[in-house]
Image (spheres, rainbow, N blue to C red):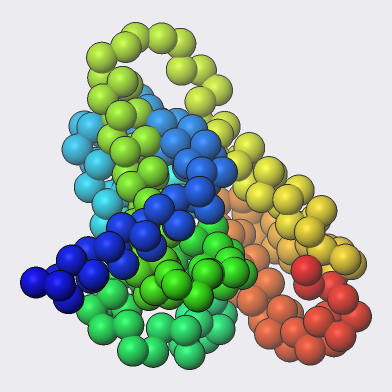
Amino acid sequence: MKEKISSKQMIVQAARCAFPYTIPIFAGFWFLGLTYGIYMNVSGFSFMYPMLMSLTIFGGSLEFLAVQMLLSAFAPLQTLIMTLMIQARHLFYGISMLDRFKGMGWKKVYLIFGMCDETFSINYSARIPQNIDEGWFMFFVTLFDHFYWFSGAAIGGLLGSLITFNTEGLDFVLTAMFVVIFLEQWLKEKKHYTALIGLLASAACLLIFDADSFMVPTMVCILCFLTIFRKPIEKAGGLA
């Protein structure tokens, strides 16, 4: 009985310790989640779509793009390639967390599934107190962030069907989100090599390919250049 109480206390302490780290994520995730849910609804989808997609996909930029994928012609190969390119950065996240996830038991599966950019940043850099279990701390950071996104998307989907308002320009939210991400990355970098690679690759592929099919070649080019020049960029301080 004593061990059971001690285990519960350990879980509660980990949750309390993890929660303050996720408060800034809550503000961003809830706003974007609400926007995503409304965007799905005004695009013709039931509120169940943003609920289930936010629960099972849990990839913000990918979920926004999935709206257009669902509305476009059936193209499974292009969708697969696009998905892999957009989420390819998680390969690097996963490699850096291999040692941290050892011995996590069943929690490891959820930690891998729920490792978005913001969750990775907290779990990788947070200074966890010695009396707090690291596995449970990372689990609750992941769970809180996942819940913020899911609840925002679910409420947005419901609001979109209950409230009538002018949604003109709402589809620009995806463009705006990527602009904000780009600016944030620009400010984080000591040098702007990776940002310039992204801009030049996008411009070149847009000139070579048409506007409807330049995305995949752009992602491939960016991934190749970053892989080839990863060490020189890191050495020159081009990554934060």
The residue sitting at the front extreme is: 2
To which quarter of the image does residue 205 belong? bottom right
Q: Quadrant of residue 201?
A: bottom right
Q: Residue furthest left?
A: 1
Residue 68 vertical placement versus 159 (above, below): below
Q: Quadrant of the C terminus?
A: bottom right
Count the numbered circles shown.
0
- Residue at image point 58% right, 59% down: 215
Quarter-wise, where is residue 104 in the image? Answer: bottom left
Where is residue 195 drawn, in percent x and y? 79, 62
Q: Foreground residue, 62 or 81?
A: 62
Please indicate, yes or no, whether residue 77 appears anywhere in the rendered image. Answer: no
| Image quadrant containing the N terminus | bottom left
Vertical order, 163 against 37 (above or below)? above
Residue drawn at (23%, 70%), measured in percent from left and top?
Answer: 7
Residue at point 38%, 43% (across, down): 148
Residue 121 vs residue 186, the one in the foreground: 121
Q: Residue 231 location in percent, x, y?
A: 79, 89
Pinpoint residue 134: horizontal percent, then vertical percent: 43, 75
Depth order, front residue of 168/47: 47
Describe residue 90's horizontal placement relative to residue 72 as left or right.
Answer: right
Looking at the image, residue 147 sits to the left or right of residue 206; the answer is left
Residue 233 location (% of width, % of height): 83, 80
Q: Residue at x 41, y 9 (%)?
A: 165
Q: Is residue 21 visible?
A: yes
Q: Please indicate whether residue 107 sits to the left or right of residue 213 in the image.
A: left
